[in-house]
Image (tube, grey):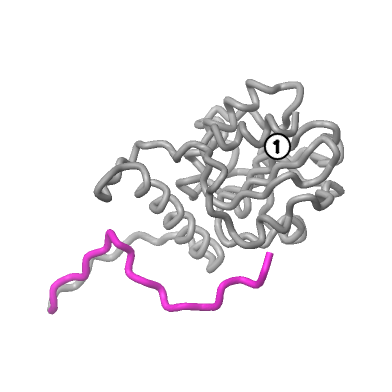
């Protein structure tokens, strides 16, 4: 991954309304500090989601419950995505899963590997998870979905996985900048990397995707 975004002044959240002059604002409870990278990813992920949803309805109307658009082969991606195709996937890494067990990516060679880089705080990532669950169920012998959480702890992943009924391994990418750099750069999340049976990257997709888009790439590798 490239260097972290430069420091910029924090903006007032959309939901925050300044107090009238002369009135003091109520104090908020202490919150955990948010990293600059997390702020940048969250902001960019929200923008991507908003742009996708705006294309779904006429006259600029937005349906917050609408799914992403179907695959059309023309979805816009980050400039570095196309350059990743055809390269040998760096599968020599070993990551911990949310239970603390070592997971060697090399052990999945011979299967189609779908690496999904995400985080629990990412709204578009949450939209994708049910699609990934369904696809892992549909292709249990040929596909392995690996969810790589970019900055969550294992303790945070476990209840989230239970809530979402995740049926594929969730790996801890927090503190593994070497691994993230190997598949980066990431300008936002979610990011999905499809690896073929031959161990080469078939496609890298930045941004939210529909189940149809995921399945289109999977079928091309079966």
Residue 165 within the magenta-colored segment of the rendering: no
Name the chief secondary structure element in magenta: loop
Start-end of magenta stretch: 1-21
Residue, x 42% and y 57% (percent of image)?
A: 47
Between 152 and 66, which is closer to the camera in this rendering?
A: 66
Percent coordinates x, y for residue 7 in the rendering: 51, 78
Q: Is residue 142 left or right of residue 186?
A: right
Work out which quarter of the rendered image holds the N terminus and state it: bottom right
| Whole-percent x, y for residue 22 in the image | 12, 78
Residue 151 pos. (x, y %): 61, 54
Residue drawn at x 48%, y 36% as measured from the top left: 70
Give the total of numbered labels. 1
Tell me what residue is drawn at x 35 percent, y 49 percent.
Answer: 54
* Viewer-nearest residue: 218 or 134: 218
Dividing the picture into quarters, in which one does residue 113 lie? top right
Q: From the viewer's perspective, is residue 57 above or below residue 211?
A: below
Q: Is residue 6 left or right of residue 66?
A: right
Q: Is residue 3 magenta?
A: yes
Between 32 and 134, the residue placed more toward the observer is 134
Above or below, comparing residue 2 to residue 210 in the picture: below
Give residue 178's quadrant in the image.
bottom right
**Image quadrant assignment for residue 64:** top left
Q: Secondary structure at mark 1?
A: loop
Residue 176 % position (x, y): 73, 57
Quadrant of the rendering where the C terminus is positioned: top right
Q: Which residue is mark 1?
A: 99
């Amino acid at each position: 991954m490239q260097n972290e975004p430069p420091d910029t002044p924090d903006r007032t959240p959309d939901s925050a309304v300044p107090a009238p002059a002369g009135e003091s604002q109520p104090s908020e409870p202490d919150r955990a500090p948010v990293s600059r990278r997390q702020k940048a990813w969250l902001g960019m992920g929200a923008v991507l989601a908003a742009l996708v949803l705006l294309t779904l309805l006429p006259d600029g109307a937005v349906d917050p419950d609408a799914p992403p658009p179907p695959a059309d082969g023309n979805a816009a991606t980050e400039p570095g995505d196309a350059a990743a195709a055809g390269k040998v996937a760096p599968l020599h890494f070993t990551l911990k899963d949310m239970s603390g067990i070592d997971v060697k990516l090399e052990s999945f060679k011979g299967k189609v590997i779908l690496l999904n880089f995400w985080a629990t705080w990412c709204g578009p990532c949450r939209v994708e998870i049910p699609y990934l669950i369904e696809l892992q169920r549909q292709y249990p012998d040929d596909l392995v979905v690996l969810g790589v959480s970019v900055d969550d702890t294992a303790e945070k992943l476990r209840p989230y996985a239970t809530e979402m009924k995740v049926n594929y391994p969730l790996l801890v990418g927090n503190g593994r900048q070497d691994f993230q750099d190997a598949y980066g750069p990431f300008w936002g999340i979610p990011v999905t990397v499809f690896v073929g049976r031959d161990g080469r990257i078939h496609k890298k997709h930045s941004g939210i995707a529909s189940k149809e888009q995921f399945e289109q790439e999977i079928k091309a590798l079966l």
